[in-house]
Amino acid sequence: MHAIILAGGKGTRLRPYTTHIPKPLVPLGDTYSILEVVLYQLRHHGFSSVTLAVGHMGHLIRAFVGDGSRYDLQVAYTDEETPLGTIGPVLTVLDDLPEHFLVMNGDILTNLDYSTFLRRHAATTRPVTVATYHREIKSEFGVLDVSEDGTTIVAFREKPTVQFQVSMGVYAMTREALRRYTPGQALGFDTLMLDLLGAGEQPGSDLFGGYWLDIGRPEDYDTANTQWATMAPILLPHLALTADALAQPSAAD
């Protein structure tokens, strides 16, 4: 099984943490970077090879990960000279990929079983399957439904809760679904979804109920570090990490 990890973004929303280090390499506690967690997880779930799509400060990621041997993975790289979006980097290596493969952001923490997710996708005829997560937003205000001319209230809801499913930033893809695009072009996940829906090729949704944290903002990163001692044994059970050991101060402290 093969995975493409998107690690080329500038991490603007996570500044100042990403001023001098790419977002996938920001540390969690005193143990691993986000990217290391992902690499260890992929190997644990049976993946043997990974392509890292790098761009901003990509040389640091190359120096840190190397050929992937310390993670027991074969790691290759593809470079973005200009931003290509979420799916654009995949197009540049499409001919080298297996029929079904994983694409994921390099800044998420989850205990999703990546191999089971990919196998479920491969057992369908879907062009793409998106790992999704349940979210809800509670309004701070009473919501009014009004007529088209805006003069009449037709319904009222006091501080309603809106429920929906969001993308986790993990996608199982079938190679042929991307053949219509030209390698080197910028292609976002949003465009891919709209193109597939417009062509009547409905993507799949695989709802996940475990742990998921998208580390996009400083408050998300703070949450990840606060939860790290508890979550590390769950995210990396095969490394025999214990919450007590992770909670101990480092020698530097």
Image (tube, grey):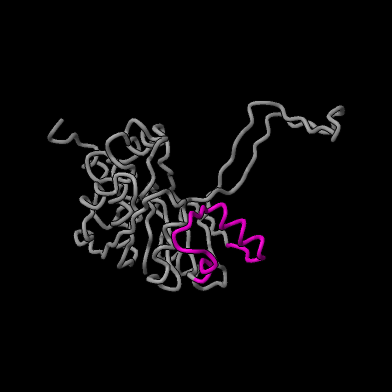
Q: Position of residue 6 (x, y in %)?
A: 39, 53
In-front residue for pair 1/149: 149
Residue 75 lies, with reference to residue 246, above or below; the image says: below
Q: Position of residue 169 (x, y in %)?
A: 47, 51
In-front residue for pair 116/214: 214
In-front residue for pair 241/109: 109
* Left/right of residue 83 with respect to residue 41 in the rendered view: right
Rendered residue at 22%/44% (across/down): 31
Tally the marks. Answer: 0
Q: Position of residue 54 (x, y in %)?
A: 33, 52
Rendered residue at 51%/52% (across/down): 188
Rendered residue at 44%/52% (across/down): 84
Q: Position of residue 207 (x, y in %)?
A: 54, 56
Placement of the N terminus among the 4 image quadrants:
bottom left
* Left/right of residue 239 with respect to residue 112 in the rendered view: left
Residue 194 within the magenta-colored segment of the rendering: yes
Residue 30 lies, with reference to residue 59, above or below; the image says: above
Rendered residue at 67%/65% (across/down): 200
Residue 188 lies, with reference to residue 142, above or below; the image says: below
Placement of the C terminus among the 4 image quadrants:
top left
* Left/right of residue 117 with respect to residue 124 in the rendered view: left
The residue segment tinted magenta is 176-203
